Amino acid sequence: MTIPTSALSAMSDYSSDDKPIVLAYSGGLDTSVAIGWIKKATGRDVVCVAVDVGQGGEDLSVIRQRALDCGASAAYIADARDEFAEDYCMPALAANAMYQGAYPLVSALSRPVIVRHLVAAAREFGATTVAHGCTGKGNDQVRFEVGITSLAPELTCLSPVRDLALTRERAIEYAEEHKLPIETTKNNPFSIDQNVWGRAIETGYLEDPWNEPTKDIYSYTDDPAFPPVADEVTIAFERGVPVAIDGQAVTPLEAIQQLNKRAGAQGIGRIDIIEDRLVGIKSREVYEAPGASALITAHRELERLTLEREQARFKPTIENRWTDLVYDGQWFSPLKGSLDAFIADTQFYVSGEIRLQLHGGRATVTGRRSQTSLYDFNLATYDEGDTFDQSNSRGFIEIVGLSTKLAARRDAAYDRL
């Protein structure tokens, strides 16, 4: 099959040198076809980069061989699961990151770690261009390209789907014509992206926001309407990072993985929202994030116990801005770096244990304790041993209410009460 003339004419900037092009490779249909598609359009070799962020599925060695079988000159494979959990998921946990109050940045968090490995591969292989499989109407094209040029401003970016008019129909036709070792079915209508932090499902019949998700779209979570016996879990944190579950030490990756299983078995972390994309359109998105949901619930509660009042009041403002920046592909921006410093400082005393009951789609806090808690039993109690001096409250109330009292007198004088 032929590449459209309009796409070929758009490739003049990419065929001006003989340096290889680095391609973010998933092992799926679109990026497998993109290898030959790019080579034909540009005349340049393609180096594939596959990054494991806990998405599961095929072994990376299988994906690497597929890339080579589809025409890649080399395949760069990276196991980034611990890196992703520690350097990307944990900062998101510290920020209690939930875009529009609901979405825990499942896809947005994985893009910058993939970008780091794409840039590393580009430098290793002497590439001047990095390609990705994103469309021209989604968020990920921004996350990849802004991330790449933030780390390596000398690199250019290419999207075969957007820049080379590579539609799914053309991809299937190309794969069948060239007998590529990849499934070419049209039966699955969904676009799915997943990693250890969660799973995103979109397109197909979900594009009509009135349609209810069917049970078969879920993979990380069981039906919350028919849960097993309630599961009690105790999560220990040190400076905002989970370090033990039920008394057993865990790494950040292990904490997420264990809670994915336990919270997922209770149907926790199903999210169905209308989301405001960066490009200006609204999109219906369905997510599963059992481990992330349980961890954020526990982390927020521990902060309520350990953060000073004004910190606790102000931190959500920073959290919302941090979350928006990450969603918008600004992981490497100066502002995010400054916000990181504030959030990291707030985590100094966020140590202790939170007990959760996992049951029927909900993670409910049932206990909390911390050596760095600001909760003082003797000040809080109404029973014997109360050390709070209630005689101070009369004067305190007079001072707190003084400005509104004066304003009320003025309103009364001008008949505005």
Image (cartoon, rainbow, N blue to C red):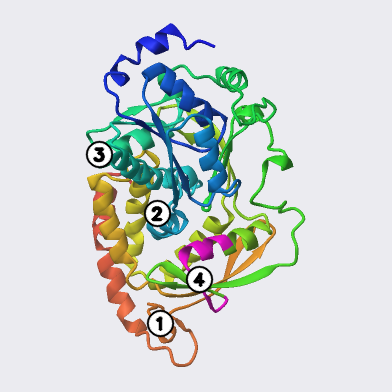
Q: Earlier in the sequence, mark 4 or mark 3?
A: 3
Label 2 neighbourhood size at 10 Å, few (<14), some (14-19), many (20+)? some
Residue shown at 42% from the left, 67% from the top: 241
Q: Which residues are magenta?
A: 246-257
Q: Are marks 4 and 3 in contact (CB under 8 Å)?
A: no
Q: How many marks?
A: 4
Residue 310 found in image quarter: bottom left
Residue 305: x percent and y percent? Answer: 42, 72
Q: Earlier in the sequence, mark 4 or mark 2?
A: 2
Up-down relation of residue 352 to residue 65 (above or below): below
Q: Is residue 204 visible?
A: yes
Tell me the distance, in whole angstroms, between the alpha carbons under discs 3 and 1.
44 Å
Q: Earlier in the sequence, mark 1 or mark 2?
A: 2
Q: Earlier in the sequence, mark 3 or mark 1?
A: 3
111 left or right, relative to 364: left
Label 1 neighbourhood size at 10 Å, few (<14), some (14-19), many (20+)? few
Q: Are marks 3 and 1 in contact (CB under 8 Å)?
A: no
Residue shown at 41% from the left, 27% from the top: 280
Quickly name the residue at label 2. Answer: 88
Q: Earlier in the sequence, mark 2 or mark 3?
A: 2
Up-down relation of residue 72 to residue 299 (above or below): above
Up-down relation of residue 340 to residue 21 (above or below): below
Quickly name the residue at label 4. Answer: 250
Marks 4, 3: nearer the viewer: 3
Q: Give amino acid for label 2.
A: Tyr
* Secondary element at image label 4: loop
**Image quarter hosting the N terminus:** top right
* Secondary element at image label 2: helix
